[in-house]
Image: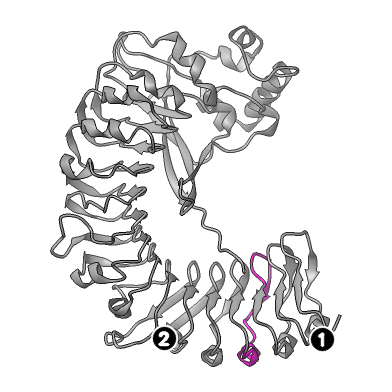
Amino acid sequence: MTQLTFLKLEENNLEGTIPSSFSELKSIELLDLGSNNLEGTIPSSFSKLRSIEVLYLDENNLEGTIPSSFSELKSVELLGLGGNNLEGTIPSSFSELKSIEHLYLNENNLSGMLDFDMFLNFKNLTSLDLSSNNLTLLTKANSNDTLQQFETLDLSSCNLRKFPDFLRNQNKLSFLHLSHNNLQGLIPKWFYNASIESLEFINLSENFLVGFEQSPIVLPWSKLSSLDLGNNSLQGSLPIPPPSTTIYRVQRNFIREMSSLLICNLSSLELLDLSYNNLSGMLPPCLGNFSSPLLVLQLRSNDFHGTIPKTWSKGSGLKMIDLSENQLQGQLPRSMANCMMLELPSCCFSGNLPTEYFLYWNAMKVVGANQLIYMELDITSRDGSFNGTVLCTVTVTNKGLNLEYDKIQDLFTDIYIGAGESSATTLEWPMSELIRNPRIMEKAQAEVRQVLIGKRKLEGKDMQQLDFAKYDQRNFKITSSCSLTNKRIQGKM
């Protein structure tokens, strides 16, 4: 075993501590113990692995501090320690890892002040992830002369108060994640020139940004695929990304204006989230032109009026659409038959909802109820550049009381149309009592499982056998809200 050079044991159910005998693998070049259930501390004897080039210890339950002796791993090119319970500071001796190219320290309990200049001395470092710790990152104002060039950089949740100045000099970045910081004010003009020809993913969400300094008509990153500006304080006009964009999120801001002409150029969009803004006017007819690529459309809680574009009838790949809390009216396009999740305004649609619509809403039918999961929708961009999950919350209004639930089991994945006037389409479910009473919920689930024996889906006649479905529904109104979470998984060599 001492001559072993390659050992991969990832994604098993390995438990216990890491044996110190691993340090006897003098010739090991790649060791992968990631995604197991390993506990305890990282053996300091790992510093004897002088030939190691790739070391994965990520996604375990390791605790304690990062051994300062890791600085002796002179050949290591990739070090993955993310997704553990490591604490303390990042050893200053890390600056001696001259060969390091990929460093992942994310999702631990690391803390303290950290001078980012430490990483600017790693001339080979191209991938760095410090996200989701308790670090306070310190960056200097005159770092623009560095020769360091990153390709992927995740500094989310690093207590940043301003855009790091060293980004001015970056021209190879493809992935930049600065969410959940304390970035305030305007996005600086110089930021538009950062990696203008290479950036594909930008996330500035969950900050305190109010706008762009001298905002360009169209944002300049020519290869941009995903842009997230959600949960800030952006005002004025909607920033328009380049036509290459497939994921665009600007939810929960104060945007008032949107150029229909410019938004119509985004014909590659697969997810568009403009919910919880101050947008008004009619829905741009060109939204229907996005029918083929568009998977998710979220326009909830704005002030749009008029009708839903009928151009969607040309064929739609939509899996989820949320137009609730607007002033829309008219008829539903038949093209919405492919939707897995559909939410509409509570007041303004009239006429009959054709029964054949329900025949095509297969994704909303209760199937496989013996394997209940939480209500969500997995989204993968067609080019594979983004993978995420739309997680849904449900707000149940019972006699004027609003109750919001973060996780809803897919037994109740349904079409939510709020109660309105007698002429409005109404479909309500008595979910509040079920959600507030776990025992009743369990009974309801057991009833459904019993009725489903030997069947793939519930039929109308089966409802007579479900006691929970006979509850008086007149006092209930249900609305849902869904948000996208990034499920980026770091690739392994």
State whether residue 105 appears in this view. yes
| Residue pictured at 30% horizontal, 47% vertical | 252
Residue 356 is situated, as x and y percent measured from the top left of the image, at 46, 11
State whether residue 258 appears in this view. no
| Residue pictured at 25% horizontal, 17% vertical | 330
Is 481 placed above or below 50 here? above
Residue 395 is situated, as x and y percent measured from the top left of the image, at 43, 33
How much space separates mark 2 and mark 1, taking CA atoms?
33 Å
In the image, taking residue 246 as reference, residue 221 lies left or right, namely: left
- Report which residue position mark 1 lands on: 24
Three-letter amino acid code of the residue under disc 1: Glu
To which quarter of the image does residue 279 belong? Answer: top left
Residue 246: which disc?
none
- Report which residue position mark 2 lands on: 120
Three-letter amino acid code of the residue under disc 2: Leu
Magenta segment boundaries in residue numbering: 57-74
User: In the image shown, does 227 or 115 lie closer to the viewer?
Assistant: 227
Q: Residues within 10 Å of mark 2 (few under 14, many from 20)?
A: some
User: In the image shown, does 183 or 390 lie closer to the viewer?
Assistant: 390
Q: Earlier in the sequence, mark 2 or mark 1?
A: 1
Looking at the rendered image, the quarter that the N terminus falls into is: bottom right
